[in-house]
Image (cartoon, grey):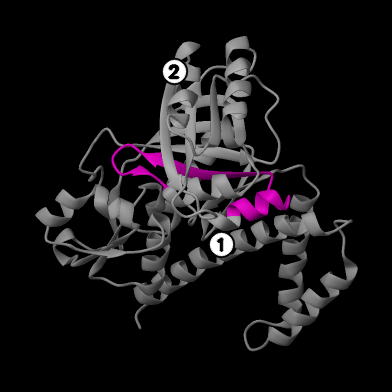
């Protein structure tokens, strides 16, 4: 190897080391929910014992000890802080993380691979908040999240709406003509159909847009590209080949912030879940409750009732505040007219 090749490999190792340290600190923050005290002498001794065993060659035990003393010092500093955690689906750089930072930049975003993990962790108090997409302007509702809203007893405390601008990313030094395969989340691939067809690129589904970027940075496949947020280029040391490749330029996704309790502030939008009684006109009568009070329903959708096949559960959003008497009256009337009723929350809408 020549000097340039060696230094490029060193740069890659440095980059990956920082990312691993970030992951370690995030895991450390999560452990504070399971400990009474920040300092755990037995655990620290175990860490130093492990690194002594792993040390050798050009990495002496003395150097390892000195390095990890700094790491544990920073870890304890973070655990002693008042940081709150918000879980998002995907890897760092995902649109969900961007929406979470817009909601509250003081929160520490924690990545999860599956939506259900977020709901479970918020429920168990391992997370203070969760954020999940509920609807995309071109691809429609995220049914998996809708089903978890029905199944879990959590509250919506805010709604974030952000523009979705997809970019084609590649390894550094790669040109568009070298790309043959493109990895991304199925929805992102669907939102960029025309671009993929025009450039004769083969779509390959991946669990997450940012996750695809992370994977490419790891496997170093020269003939592959990914569709992901442009922020992922900096996070995973990739190159932006082309920005804004989505078919519809007016492309937005709505996210909801999940918590265990209702928010303290007054909202301007409410969400409910209900099932109509098994009688002719039952659903119509529920909808008339809103019409009679001049309340604007902004969305209503149905999901199969998994406990009773053939029945349906409805999720509805409407404009209004709990401080408005006609809203509280409507909620009471809908609850009385429904077979099942759940109030998800009254919250603020935030737009980027």
Residue nearest the viewer, comparing 98 with 4: 98
Q: Is residue 216 visible?
A: yes
The x, y position of residue 220, in whole percent, is 34, 72
Badge 1: residue crowd in 10 Å (few <14, some 14–19, many ≥20): few
The x, y position of residue 317, in whole percent, is 48, 28
Q: Label 1, secondary structure: give it.
A: helix
Q: Residue at x 80, y 59 (%)?
A: 34
Q: Quadrant of residue 202?
A: bottom left
Q: Residue at x 26, y 71 (%)?
A: 222
Residue at which label 2 appears? 296
Q: CA distance from mark 2 to mark 1?
A: 49 Å
Query: Is residue 219 covered in magenta?
Result: no
**Position of 296 compared to 18: left or right?**
left
Q: Residue at x 54, y 36 (%)?
A: 274
Q: Residue at x 24, y 44 (%)?
A: 246
The x, y position of residue 190, in whole percent, is 25, 52
Q: Is residue 204 above or below residue 329?
A: below
Residue at which label 1 appears? 18
Q: Which residues are magenta?
A: 118-142
């Amino acid at each position: 190897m020549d000097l340039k090749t060696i230094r490029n490999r060193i740069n890659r190792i440095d980059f990956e080391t920082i990312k691993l340290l970030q992951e370690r600190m995030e895991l450390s923050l999560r452990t504070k929910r399971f400990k009474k005290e920040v300092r755990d002498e037995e655990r620290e001794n175990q860490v130093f014992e492990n690194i002594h065993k792993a040390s050798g060659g050009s990495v002496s035990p003395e150097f390892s000890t000195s390095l990890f003393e700094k790491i544990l010092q920073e870890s304890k500093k973070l655990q002693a802080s008042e940081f709150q955690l918000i879980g998002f689906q995907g890897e760092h750089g995902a649109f969900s993380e961007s929406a979470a930072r817009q909601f509250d930049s003081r929160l520490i975003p924690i990545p999860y691979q599956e939506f259900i993990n977020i709901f479970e962790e918020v429920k168990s108090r391992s997370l203070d908040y969760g954020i999940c997409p509920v609807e995309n302007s071109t691809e429609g509702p995220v049914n998996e999240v809708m089903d978890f809203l029905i199944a879990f007893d959590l509250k919506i405390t805010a709604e974030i709406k952000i523009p979705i601008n997809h970019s084609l990313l590649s390894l550094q030094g790669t040109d568009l003509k070298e790309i043959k395969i493109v990895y991304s989340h199925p929805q992102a691939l669907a939102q960029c159909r025309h671009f993929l067809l025009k450039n004769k690129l083969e779509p390959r589904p991946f669990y997450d847009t940012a996750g695809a970027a992370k994977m490419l940075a790891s496997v170093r496949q020269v003939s592959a590209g990914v569709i992901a947020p442009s922020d992922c280029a900096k996070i995973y040391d990739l190159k932006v080949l082309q920005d804004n490749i989505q078919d519809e330029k007016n492309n937005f996704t709505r996210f909801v912030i999940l918590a265990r309790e209702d928010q303290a502030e007054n909202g301007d939008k409410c969400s409910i879940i209900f099932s109509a009684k098994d009688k002719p006109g039952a659903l119509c009568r529920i909808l008339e409750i809103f019409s009679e009070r001049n309340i604007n329903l902004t969305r209503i959708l149905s999901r199969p009732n998994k406990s009773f096949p053939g029945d349906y559960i409805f999720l509805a959003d409407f404009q209004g505040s709990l401080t408005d008497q006609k809203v509280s009256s409507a909620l009471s009337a809908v609850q009385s007219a429904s077979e099942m009723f759940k109030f998800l929350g009254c919250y603020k809408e935030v737009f980027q």
